[in-house]
Every structure is written in structure tokens, then in C-alpha cells.
Amino acid sequence: MRLAIGIATRGRAAILAETLDKLERQTRRPDRIIVCHVTPEDVGAPRPGVEYLLSPAGLPRQRNAILDATADCDLLLFLDDDFLPAPDYCAVTEAVLAARPDCVVTTGTVLADGANAPGYSPEEGRAILARDRYAGGPLAAAAAFQRLWLQHGGAAGSGAAARHPGG
């Protein structure tokens, strides 16, 4: 399966860099990483292996631009720019969708969510992920997707995967 990750962002280059760092450490690397932004300042220095799309502001517009750009992929994972995935997030997502052809959308277990609090620093987020140890099988619904939502600038992180409508 060809797996793409799409991230819509605006004004949060520092936390986006943390998310992209975590994606570089995936046990199953995505085939494509697409970041859709509004201004060049939204993304910081370009990274090798990351595709950048410029779009008008607005999450629906940005995600639609990502959808249009990923027609060659079977799976599309939409991640928020403050989402820190566990190292096997992509591998487990792909395994769930391969094992369950009737499944079209996945989400996961939230380890911490800073939306209604001051939020978590990237260091705190990495520590929370490091402490999480699930002893069950990787396809167990309750822990198939370990992730962390951070709060930076007013929006909580999110991650969801779906079969691409064109794939």
C-alpha cells in the first residue's frame, strides 16, 4: 500500500518540526509526507522528503489540497501539526487497514490532550510516549495507535487515517 501523511498547518513552524522529527523515526516510513501551508513562515526550513503545498487558509481547503495531491496513494493519514505519533504508528495503521478491508477510517487512543489545559511541551510529549507500554497485540482496538495531542496556540492535535477515495 502507498501511504501518505498530510499535515495542514498555519503559524506553528516549531511544533510542526517536532511532528516531522517523529515521522522520520517511523518503523514504516510513509511513501509521501505533504505539508499544506499558507505562508512560507508556517513551515520553517524545507526538509528533504517532505512535499510542500501552498493553499488559502482554512483546514477544509488545506485538507482538500492534500487529498487532490495524494490520488496516487491508497491510504492517507491526516495529522495535526502538533501530533506526536508512536514509532510504529504508520505500520500499525497500515496493518489494521490491510487486516480489515471493510475498515475505511481509523483513529487511536489519546495518551494526553492539552486542549483544555496549558498544554504540553514537546519534551513532555516525548516523555509521555516513552512511558507508554501496551502489552496487547498491535491490532487491538484500544491501543493500536499511540499518540499524543499537544496544545500550542489554541488547537488540539489529531490524527486519523482513511482509505484514499481514489485508491
Image: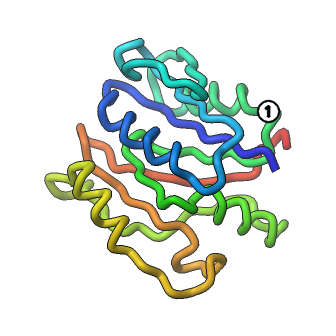
Which quarter of the figure has residue 95? bottom right
Name above or below for residue 152 compared with residue 158. above
Q: Nearer the viewer, residue 151 or 138?
A: 138
Q: Is residue 29 left or right of residue 119?
A: right
Residue annotated with mark 1: 71
Instruction: Provide the secondary structure element on which disc 1 rests.
Output: loop
Q: Neighbour class for label 1 at 10 Å: few (<14), some, many (≥20)? A: some
Residue 143, position as x, y percentages in the image:
52, 76
Residue type at numbered disc 1: Ala
Residue positioned 63% across, 25% down in the render: 65
Above-or-below relation of 44 to 83: above
Residue at (66% x, 44% y) in the render: 30
Question: In the drawing, does residue 118 fall left or right of residue 113?
Answer: left
User: Which quarter of the figure is the C terminus placed in?
Assistant: top right
Where residue 16 sits in the image (x, y, percent)?
39, 35
Residue 133 vs 43, above or below: the answer is below
The correct choice, above or below, for 138 with respect to 65 in the image is below
Give me the residue at 69% from left, 33% from top.
67
Residue 114 in the image, given as x and y percentages of width and height: 25, 57
The residue at the far left in this view is 118
Residue lying at 50% horizontally and 16% vertically, measured from the top left: 56
Q: Is residue 140 left or right of residue 108?
A: right
Q: Looking at the picture, how far across and down is residue 124, in whole percent? A: 23, 58
Left or right for 149, reference 31: left
